[in-house]
Image: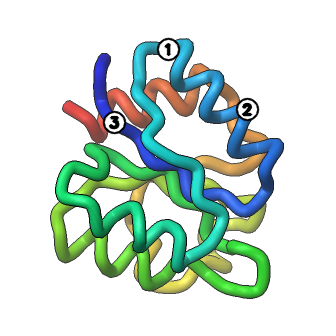
Amino acid sequence: MNARVLIVEDDALIALDLADQLNGSGFIVVGTPSSVAAAHAILDQATACDVVVLDVNLGRDTSESIAHRLILEGTPFLVISGYSSAQHPIVFQGKPALNKPVRLERLLAELSKICN
């Protein structure tokens, strides 16, 4: 799989681990922004990504505006969070989601579903 993946995650260790795992599984990680502004800056590039792995909470902010943008642009995304889906803002309801800690096999299975 050569899908370009953007990983939006505020925990640097988690972001690096996910990036290593996805790069080793045939994905192309195009960035690991840790803030809403940095994610939007990458998404502003014409060929930014094919799919996004999106943490709900980014420090004191949420990634709601990123999710709204991805929906409008038709870019699929996978939600990852340490919180239950009932605690997520409404924009994340019904989207593919995994709980942290994320297991590689589950991540690859979900990404395969939404990339095809």
- Dividing the picture into quadrants, the one containing residue 59 is bottom right
Q: Earlier along the polypeptide chain: callout 1 or callout 3?
A: 3
Q: Give the total of numbered labels.
A: 3
* Label 1 environment density (alpha carbons within 10 Å; few <14, some 14–19, many ≥20): few
Q: Secondary structure at mark 1?
A: loop
Q: Secondary structure at mark 2?
A: helix
Q: Earlier along the polypeptide chain: callout 2 or callout 3?
A: 3
Q: Is residue 48 above or below residue 30?
A: below
Q: Which residue is mark 3?
A: 4
Q: Is residue 69 above or below residue 53?
A: below
Viewer-closest of 66 and 103: 66
- Label drawn at residue 25: 1
Q: Residue at x 29, y 21 (%)?
A: 2
Q: Is residue 4 left or right of residue 83?
A: left
Instruction: Name the image quarter holding the C terminus.
Output: top left
Q: Secondary structure at mark 3?
A: strand
Q: Residue at x 33, y 64 (%)?
A: 43
Q: Taking the image as drawn, is residue 97 in sight? A: no
Q: Earlier along the polypeptide chain: callout 2 or callout 1?
A: 2
Q: Mark 2 near mark 1, Cβ–Cβ under 8 Å?
A: no
- Label drawn at residue 79: none
Q: Which residue is mark 2?
A: 17
Viewer-closest of 55 and 91: 55
Instruction: Give x and y (percent) for residue 27.
Output: 41, 24
Q: Is residue 64 left or right of residue 58?
A: left
Q: Residue at x 41, y 28 (%)?
A: 28
Q: Is residue 90 above or below residue 71?
A: below
Q: CA distance from mark 1 to mark 3?
A: 12 Å
- Dividing the picture into quadrants, the one containing residue 9 is bottom right
